[in-house]
Image (cartoon, helix red, strand yellow):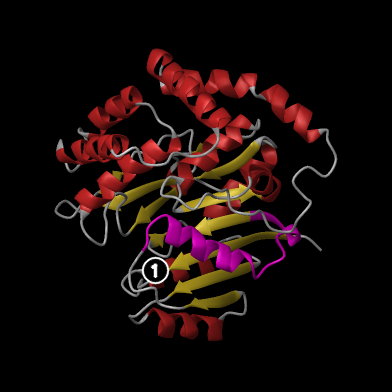
Amino acid sequence: MISRYCIISPCRDESEFMRRTLDSILGQTTPPSLWVIVDDGSTDETPRILEEYARQCDLIRIVRRDDRGQRSVGPGVISAFYAGLATIELNQFEFLCKLDLDLDMPKNYFETLIQRMEENPRIGTCSGMAYYIEHYTKRMVSEKISEEMSVGAAKLYRRECFQQIGGFVRQVMWDGIDCHRCRMLGWKACSWDDPELRFIHLRPMGTSDTGWWTGRMRHGAGQYFMGTSLAYMTVSALYRMTRPPVLLGGLAMWWGFVKAMLARRPRYDDPEFRGFLRHYQWQCLLKGKRRATDELDRRQASVFATRSTKPNQGSESTAAQPLTAS
């Protein structure tokens, strides 16, 4: 019997936030069939809290990893994700979600996303939109994720799509590369800013265990690795300068990109992908992101139709292997 969906949650030292995430997922109108939580060497109260919830709920499975000594955003998170994926038979599930443990989710999040994916078979990955609570005004502020991407903190995948793209790359921009590969193979990647799909990011995007400047620079370096051009990165950084922290946030992203470029760091080792990405980004600059994405999705419909008529596409193994990088 094929189950609806499985969640895999890498976590490390999340005792400050995780109860809200655990309670919001266990209270879903459509709960997961299995929730694998990978404790990536936590040194706080995370293991005790996980044990507490696992005793009360049979659908939670805990995977423990040794303490590597520090938080590792990007490669470490995805390595922990794959440690969880290795414990399941992926072909037993229709959908797969990578979910962080610093979120507060609306109760019908998964019910709504699954319904929309069933209505549109080309949607390979999707999510709601992330918000954070502004410190002084206590109001919800959007993290302004583009609607042509699924948010890395809470992205849901159709299992066949996840397998066809080859899973996640073990680098900072794993949650950008995967969405572009989806579109490259004819799938759609998207997110919706609807009230019933807005979730609270308790640790806002772009922050870091060593500070927000480091987090923003890391994002810029990740854009360089993915294959983004300097022109597109500059425009993106200028836009981010209008978001908190005003000016400096965008500047940190741009400097992270330029620093990686000057150091000639390795880039994602797929020239076809990088060409696809740059063409799309130039179209976004010329036509606007929404129009460029709509036109690309229409063109890629034929790619999806061709792939969907081939038998057993992406189902040769029960778990997608991580994309490689050089």
Q: Residue at x 64, y 54 (%)?
A: 321
Q: In the image, residue 199 lies at what x, y percent?
A: 40, 52
- Observer-nearest residue: 151 or 23? 151
Q: Residue at x 58, y 68 (%)?
A: 84
Magenta region includes residue 210: no
> Magenta span covers which residues?
72-95
Does residue 31 appear in this view?
Answer: no
Residue to which mark 1 is pinned: 20
Q: Is residue 238 left or right of residue 326?
A: left
Q: Position of residue 320 (x, y in %)?
A: 66, 53
Q: Position of residue 79 (x, y in %)?
A: 50, 62
Residue located farthest toward the right when viewing the structure as drawn: 311
Q: Secondary structure beneath disc 1?
A: helix
In the rendered image, the vertical position of residue 307 relative to residue 214, given as above or below: above
Question: Residue 210 is drawn in which quadrant?
Answer: bottom left
Q: Is residue 163 visible?
A: yes
Residue under the image location 52 percent in, 49 percent down: 169
Identify residue type, mark 1: Arg
Left or right, residue 107 beside residue 301:
left
